[in-house]
Amino acid sequence: MSELTITLMRLGLLVALWAFVIAVVGVLRGDLYGTQVTQRRSAPPRGNTPRPVARGAAPARVPAEQRPVGRRPQERGDREPRQLRVMSGPLAGSNLPLREAGTLVGRSPESALVLEDDFASGRHARIYKGPQGWVVEDLGSTNGTFIGQQRLDAPTPVSAGTEIRFGTTIVELRR
Amino acid sequence: MTTVSSLASRKGRNVELGLLVFAVAIVALAYINVGVAVEGAIPPSLVAVGSGFVIITAVFHLVMRWRAPYADPLILPIATLLNGLGLVMINRLDLANGRDLAEGMALRQLMWSAIAAALAIAALIILRDHRILRRYTYLAGALGFGLLLLPLVPGLGVENYGSRIWIAVGPFSFQPGEVAKIVLAIFFAGYLVQTRDALSVADRRILGLTLPRGRDLGPILVAWMLSVGVLVLEKDLGSSLLFFGLFVAMLYVATERTSWVAIGMLLFCVGCYIANMIFSHVQRRVLLWLDTFSREALDTSDQLARGIMGMASGGMFGTGLGRGRPDLTYFAESDFIIPSFGEEIGLIGLFALLLLYVLLIERGLRTAIGARDGFGKLLASGLAFSVALQCFVVVGGVTRVIPLTGLTMPFLSQGGSSLLANWTLVALLLRISDHARRPVPDPAAPNPVASNQTQVVRLR
């Protein structure tokens, strides 16, 4: 067979080898399975006045993440906390909508509020909606969850404005 | 602020099938290329060898669909491609040395590939859960050290080319060190999962390193003495380095303490220094490494020099398969298969090969990250690291980064024991990754058994 065929084959082999490597890398990129990172909006500036909303108006059912944080129509009166704000610690100033099913706080990437705090545990605490209102529960964390000087050993009801401390992070429930 | 949520993983069996077809096509192209370049025609053995190779691959893939549907889709195609390219190069060296297919090494290598794949398939079918292996931790330890020291048994061990790492039973010869690598990884994983809490206790900080307590140094010293024993008694630097490096790496993964790596390196350097002072075979290796082209070194062995000259003549694009003279180097098909490839597919092709190893190792480490049990994490990272270290030792040896030691390149090199061990290693990685990627059963979903009522006990 001609020399040209052999040259073509030999270069084709190199191309094929690299195409295989690139195909594998392509699969790798699509295969970063396990976790998905969602970027949240930054917190609105402080002193923001809530937009007046007509009572009883049916709010549109939009997934919580898509609603602008901090200017949410208030469905059930003013007394209900709707969001979690980080008051101090590495993430100070962040806001997070509370979920009724429970908001997991901890260093584990699966938590809703991922603490970058060396004094917090992987699954540190959970804030969920009990029959009486919002409840914070310590999930057996090493350094404990505190309200004031009190270390929590049982699920404890919290209201808006109560400061809860995980490690060096202090969060507060906000309306 | 960002949130991270878990996603269900895809199975990826169709991706695997596509890549396997691609891998087999590359191997076929390379095989035809060799035939055309050497004999001027498409080799008549293509159908026989090719169908054998396709059958092995297809059976393995079907077993994966059946028994490990969630396993990583990239490990098998990469291993298949490497094994196939090794076959092509061995066949090419057979042609250069005037051996036909029936008496050549390529057919034997294909046969060993089939046996190795069959063993890996059997391992996948029998071993339904890698955590079962943890029960045999100490048995694996005894077996591993036994295998490592087996070549020293008089009448069984054989000394080849200065290293006593072979055993011969009748017509068969075997390198037990290859299998020992897997068994020892199982032992280290099981042992370190139990003891890592004690081993990661911090003592005091020196120069920014948190040192472990003195009494916890026992295991690493035992491992070091065994590896020095292998070096001295079997005169095999490669196995010794592989075994000790594997232990230190797994110790680091288990305890997250950098100080163990520092201690391990220090011990290793001390061991090397002493060995270089005392043993002539080590001195010879060092001489060949540092002054490869000196008269003195060339009188001892010109193997490394020939390998390097071969790679140099290949250059960037290589001479093309079948157009170089890799057969001029001794052991061009086993220890020196990397220079053989470097000569014929060039630096560009060689880097593609090395990237394939990198990707294989990455998949192993990714499996370790995904594994949900500590034993699986340690075992997967140990197995992946053993491949990485072995590649480093081989490629570093033939490119004069470190002294040349006798280890085989996983999947590429000619040799039955190496293929058996590495395919079994792949089977274990596939088993762990199947477990790691399988979706977790939803705890909120009602358990069908729990909601069943029994006839005898009824509550209300």
Image (cartoon, rainbow, N blue to C red):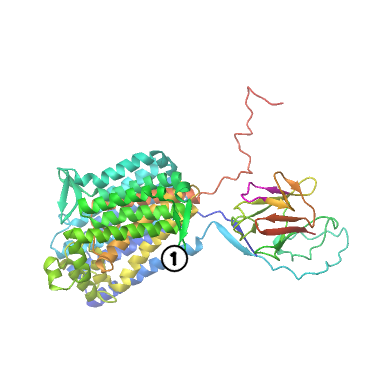
Q: Secondary structure at mark 1?
A: helix
Q: Chain of mark 1?
A: A
Indicate the position of residue B452 as horizontal and vertical percent values.
Answer: 62, 31
State the residue lying farthest toward the left. Answer: B299
Number of on-image labels: 1
Please, what is the three-letter code of the amino acid marked with disc 1? Answer: Val
Q: Nearer the viewer, residue A41 or A171?
A: A171
Indicate the position of residue A28 as horizontal and vertical percent values.
Answer: 47, 62
Q: Nearer the viewer, residue A40 or B426?
A: A40
Residue holding disc 1:
A25
Res. B20 visible in picture: no
Q: Which residues are magenta?
A: A136-144
Magenta-colored stretch includes residue A140: yes
Indicate the position of residue B307 as horizontal and vertical percent values.
Answer: 20, 69
Chief secondary structure of the magenta portion: loop
In terms of image quadrants, where is residue A61? bottom right
Q: Residue at x 71, y 66 (%)?
A: A93
In terms of image quadrants, where is residue A115? bottom right
